Amino acid sequence: MEESGERRRATAERNGINIQNERSLHAGLKLWYAQPEDRFEVPVGGFVIDLVRGPQLVEIQTRNFTAIRPKLQALLKEHKVHLLHPITYEKWVVQVDAKGTSVLSRRKSTFRGALTDIFEELVRIPELVKHEGFTLEFPLIREEEVRCRDGKGSKHRKKVSIKDRKLLEVISSHRFTCAQDFLLFLPPNLPQPFSNKDLEKALQLPLHRCRQITYCLRKMEALTVVGKNRNELLYSVLSPVTTEPESSTLPQPSE
């Protein structure tokens, strides 16, 4: 039986989880993932680990894999590590006043994410996927983004600051345990060998995303370059898919 949010929170607080000084999305994911016997904020090898479950160290990273790369490299020398990274499927935008005390508006964003968005960050650590002690999990989520028109945000956001991100719902979660699991992103109708433009046509994705996919698969040693067609590299799969990750099918959430 699945624990309620309040019960998870109570369990976490008993086990010493620190949710007071965290960003809301990070804290929400920790509460969602937590089980009764987990330990939280555990010092290991000079680092503080988000969650420890038996022999496995669990790190939650909501963005910027570059920042966590050195930590993962160090920990994987002696430990099994599970990395949790959320992918936003649906977003609600809340505007607050300059003091952050009053809600001015709330609307549903036109943004729609997809599981292939994992490669936006995965390009920073693809080699780590080859490590047998490393696994990854990508919860597909609905989130609420809190914004404030305070003049401190970036130019492309028109000086609007993002004050917080809050977890509304985990729609599904997708676990990858080895490089071959990521081959599910290659559709069966691909020509062999194939180019990034072939992948773009088959997946109906932007070319830059297809390049991220093939780059990661090459670094994971699941894909290899076998030739060129004019200026286009041609790729072929190195290893067959032997297992499928949990929840490998992208869900169609209800609106």
Image: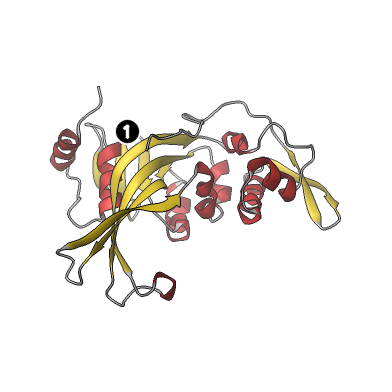
Query: Does 91 appear above or below 10?
Result: below
The spot of residue 182 in percent (x, y) is 58, 38
Tell me where residue 255 sits by quadrant: top left
Q: Which of the pair 33/209 is nearer the observer?
A: 209
The answer to whether residue 79 shows anywhere in this view is no
The spot of residue 238 in percent (x, y) is 72, 37
Q: Which residue is tagged 1?
A: 54
Q: Residue furthest bottom?
A: 151
* Side (left or right) of 225 relative to 74: right
Q: Which of the pair 15/193 is nearer the observer?
A: 193
Colour mode of the rendering? secondary structure
Residue depicted at 64% across the width and 42% down the height: 203
* Side (left or right) of 173 relative to 27: right
Q: Which of the pair 153/86 is nearer the observer?
A: 153
Q: Amino acid at mark 1?
A: Gly
The spot of residue 175 in percent (x, y) is 46, 35
